[in-house]
Amino acid sequence: MTGFSASRLRRLDDALNAYAESGEVPGLVAVVARGDAVHVVAAGVQDLATAVPVARDTIFRIASMTKPIAAAAAMILVEEGKLRLDEPVDRLLPELADRRVLRTLESEIDDTVPAHRPITLRDLLTFRCGFGMLMAKPGTYPIQKAVSEAGFAPGPTAAQFAPDDWIARFSRLPLMTQPGQRWHYHTGSDILGVLIARAAGQPFDAFLAERVFAPLGMKDTAFFVPPEKIGRLATSYMIDRESGKPGVFDAGAGGPWSQPPVFASGSSGLVSTADDYLAFGQMMLNGGRHGGGRILSRATIGLMTADHLLPTQKAASPFYPGFWDEHGWGLGLSVITARHGYLSVGAYGWDGGLGTTFRNDPQEGLTCILLTQRAMRSPVPEAIYTDIWALTYQALDD
């Protein structure tokens, strides 16, 4: 395995620079790595108003690319015997004992039945805990209004409740479906952060900093950006549905990521850089090893990157059309189960709704990361995502 073709990598450079020059994305940093070969592209601007150029160390909000990191943190505690995959979470989260479950999704929130069994750590990691995003228009189901009123509607910023308050408030809502019945995106990772904190005996953000970020050298990854680094945080944009133009979501200083959050979200709270996330991705690709040390065992990485969903669970779990035809779900990340595009069967990773994507391909020894600051318009991968994957694979040189 010899890395990349230099001439073919220029196609990747040209395409990504064109995305920035056209305004399709304000700015981006991409990194593709294979063996000792690491190729980085930085293009465009951090902020459209100031035109400060993007640099390799620009900090981006990685949104749901937080989920694989939270899952890895949980598995550190499993390896230490402080958590068990199939143990009910009630021991550390007594608020979630004796759950009630909606009779049907169409039921009013007081029309419930007892849960058939407790929620387990495996349920949280595989998003089968019985609660999460519903891929339906607001107002389709009564539970959607209750979730919104309780402050738990999934969104780009974290809830404004301290962890103990968050889990107490969550416990007052019924589950949407029985634990283990179907895949519900998102919320399992937020519950996971509270569970990790209690199992570790320290705040979730402190555990990540000590046990994941410091060993991997992820010096710019955190739940907020301190004042001395705020100038490197890219302005975040969302596309206005009527005009089609980007509007500012968060400009940095004074915004949600410029100060420690009330709730450190395991689903979507982190900021990071391309090199920081590369360290995490390559640790996963190297079977849990980083440098001369080990973060996780090879067996644990194998468990995280296997498909844990049954066909019946996929059939009951709408996401976007065609998703389950080629994807499964591991522990905190998606897994390719059938080759449709360039990604090999067994490749894994996830996207962030604020404009980021990450994939590892063990068959090719490849890591591919793209960070932008323009939010996704739907769960379907953006054209720039599929382009970077295609252009990376065409540059492989064996």
Image: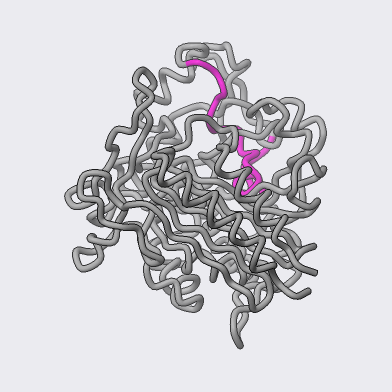
Classify the position of the N terminus by image quarter.
bottom right
Q: Locate residue 258: give its quadrant.
A: bottom left
- Residue 287 drawn in magenta: no
Q: Give the range drawn in magenta.
A: 117-137
Q: Which residue is drawn at 54% across and 33% down?
A: 132
Q: In this view, does 126 lie above or below 175?
A: below
Quarter the C terminus occupies: bottom right
Q: Is residue 121 visible?
A: no
From the top left corner, tell me how far across and down residue 106 is, in percent.
58, 11
- Front residue of this view, candidates 322 and 14: 14
Q: Whole-percent x and y of residue 332? A: 61, 51
Q: Is residue 121 above or below residue 294?
A: above
* Horizontal side of residue 321 vs 73, given as left or right: right
Give the residue furthest to the front. Answer: 7
- How many numbered marks appear? 0
- Predominant SS of the magenta segment: loop
Q: Position of residue 387 (x, y in %)?
A: 61, 45
Residue 342 makes an appearance in the image: yes
Q: Residue at horizontal 61%, vertical 71%?
A: 283
Nearer-the-camera pick, 241 or 100: 241
Q: Residue at x 78, y 40 (%)?
A: 340
Q: Is 279 on the left or on the right of 149, as rendered?
A: right
Residue 126 among magenta residues? yes
Please name the residue shown 63% across and 53% down the image.
Answer: 349
- Which x, y percent locates residue 125? 62, 49
